[in-house]
């Protein structure tokens, strides 16, 4: 787990977002220690049951706090959050740990060879690096169940594709810049596709329907076609249960 360097980071800024939300901004970069500050404040606010808070939305570098203006004021909310900031400490955030099977390459990972070529690596080395890293879910993304996971090994960093795809299948495991993700639904996309997992990251038949949460940790395990097909068959038959290997609900 990355060491927290809170004392080296800038003081948070409090910014109004309309008349019913307040943003606590901790910095301007994607950084694990900075993101841990976001997560710690969010968790502290949940535990404290801050009056008037309606919802908490963590991002890479900030926490948006939606509030009811008939219950609290922007000034009162900021005072409460500042107090919580002084009580959150500096320990690293440790969410649930998940391990997902991934079939890399071939038709499910059409960009693997191109990524290898552009990075000067072999396809096998790309898989080894990607699957050999433990990632943190910094924030939830632009579709239900999609988490932005980081940080990928520096050797794999590439900008997004110059020509996005019109259709990216659900379960596609992809990289872009210094992040990786799993497409939770079929959608357009411009990330580089390395492989696919048969695990459903969003399923309305499951409770809760979204598998990951901000603060969770993720590992990918390279598997063969037989394992991929076996898990996919279970999912197709309605066995949508999938548990973290560590943390609440783990096995």
Image (tube, rainbow, N blue to C red):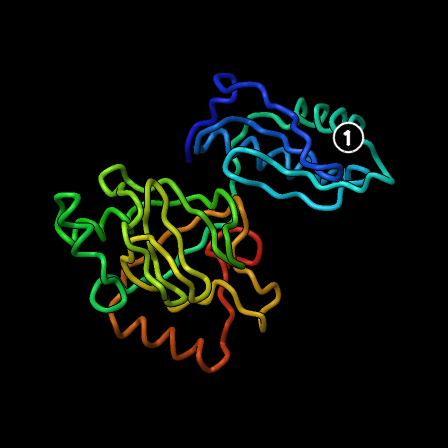
- Residue nearer the viewer, 184 or 40: 184
Answer with left or right where residue 13 lies relative to residue 158: right
Residue at the (54%, 59%) spot, across then down: 144
The x, y position of residue 172, in whole percent, is 35, 62
Answer with left or right where residue 199 lies relative to residue 86: left
Residue density around tag 1, few if under 14, some if 14–19, many if 20 or more, within 10 Å: some
Residue beneath label 1, please?
74
Residue at the (27%, 41%) spot, across then down: 157
- Residue nearer the viewer, 35 or 27: 27
Quarter location, residue 186: bottom left
Residue at the extreme right:
70
The x, y position of residue 104, in whole percent, is 25, 61
- Residue nearer the viewer, 249 or 172: 172
Quarter location, residue 167: bottom left
Residue at the (47%, 26%) spot, across then down: 4
Looking at the rendered image, the quarter that the N terminus falls into is: top left
Residue at the (13%, 49%) spot, across then down: 117
Say above or below: 148 vs 36.
below
- Residue nearer the viewer, 99 or 70: 70
Answer with left or right where residue 212 lies relative to residue 198: right
The x, y position of residue 174, in whole percent, is 33, 54
The x, y position of residue 224, in whole percent, is 24, 68
**Total number of numbered labels?**
1
Name the secondary structure under disc 1: helix
């Amino acid at each position: 787990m990355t060491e927290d360097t809170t004392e080296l980071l800038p003081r948070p800024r409090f910014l109004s977002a309309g008349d019913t939300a307040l943003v606590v901004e901790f910095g301007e970069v994607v950084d694990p220690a900075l993101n841990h500050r976001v997560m710690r404040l969010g968790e502290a606010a949940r535990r404290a049951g801050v009056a008037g808070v309606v919802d908490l939305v963590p991002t890479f570098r900030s926490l948006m706090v939606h509030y009811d203006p008939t219950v609290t004021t922007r000034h009162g909310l900021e005072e409460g959050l500042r107090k919580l900031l002084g009580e959150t400490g500096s320990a690293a955030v440790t969410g649930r740990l998940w391990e997902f099977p991934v079939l890399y390459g071939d038709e499910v990972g059409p960009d693997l060879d191109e990524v290898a070529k552009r990075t000067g690596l072999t396809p096998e080395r790309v898989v080894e690096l990607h699957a050999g890293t433990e990632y943190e879910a910094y924030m939830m993304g632009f579709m239900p169940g999609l988490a932005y996971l980081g940080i990928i090994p520096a050797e794999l960093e590439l900008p997004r594709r110059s020509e996005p795809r019109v259709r990216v299948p659900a379960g596609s495991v992809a990289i872009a810049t210094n992040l990786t993700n799993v497409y939770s639904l079929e959608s357009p996309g411009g990330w580089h596709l390395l492989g696919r997992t048969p695990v459903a990251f969003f399923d309305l038949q499951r409770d809760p329907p979204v598998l990951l949460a901000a603060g969770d940790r993720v590992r990918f395990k390279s598997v063969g076609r037989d394992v991929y097909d076996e898990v996919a068959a279970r999912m197709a038959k309605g066995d949508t249960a999938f548990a973290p290997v560590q943390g609440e609900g783990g096995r």
